[in-house]
Amino acid sequence: MQTMDNLKKLRKLDQANNDGWKKFQQFNSAAMAQGAISVKNKELIAVAVALTTQCNYCLELHRQGAEKAGAA
């Protein structure tokens, strides 16, 4: 039921001028920004949460984020 192709649909939310989506993006940017906890550790925490909630989309996005932030 979950296919990574569905992630491409997120662009439609952005293009639809969806206020809720924009607010989520602002929240996510602030939450994942460098701070007392590094971006790499925040992404690794998000991977653990995604494993717990079994969200394949979150798992893939945060796996990519963790990799980009230097996790091996």
Image (spheres, rainbow, N blue to C red):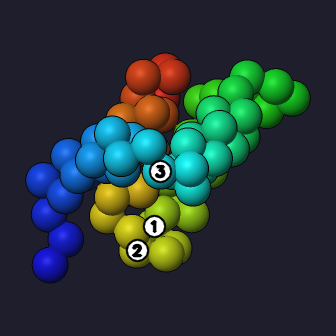
Specify the quadrant that holds the N terminus. Answer: bottom left
Label 1, label 2: how far apart the Cα atoms are: 5 Å
Specify the quadrant that holds the C terminus. Answer: top left
Does the CB distance between marks 1 and 2 fall below 8 Å? yes
Hey, which quadrant is residue 4 in on the image?
bottom left
* Residue that carries the numbered disc 3 in the rendered image: 18
Q: Between residues 18 and 30, which one lies in front from this camera angle?
A: 18
Q: Between residues 23 and 5, which one lies in front from this camera angle?
A: 23
Q: Which residue is drawn at 27% across and 47% down?
A: 12
Q: Nearer the viewer, mark 3 or mark 2?
A: 3
Q: First in sequence, mark 3 or 2: give its number.
A: 3
Q: First in sequence, mark 3 or 1: give its number.
A: 3
Image-based side of 6 in relation to 20, left or right: left
Image-based side of 66 in relation to 13, left or right: right
Residue 51 shows which numbered tag?
1
* Residue that carries the numbered disc 2 in the rendered image: 54
Image-based side of 12 in relation to 4, left or right: right
Residue kind at label 3, given as amino acid type? Asn
Residue kind at label 2, given as amino acid type? Gln
The residue furthest right is 36
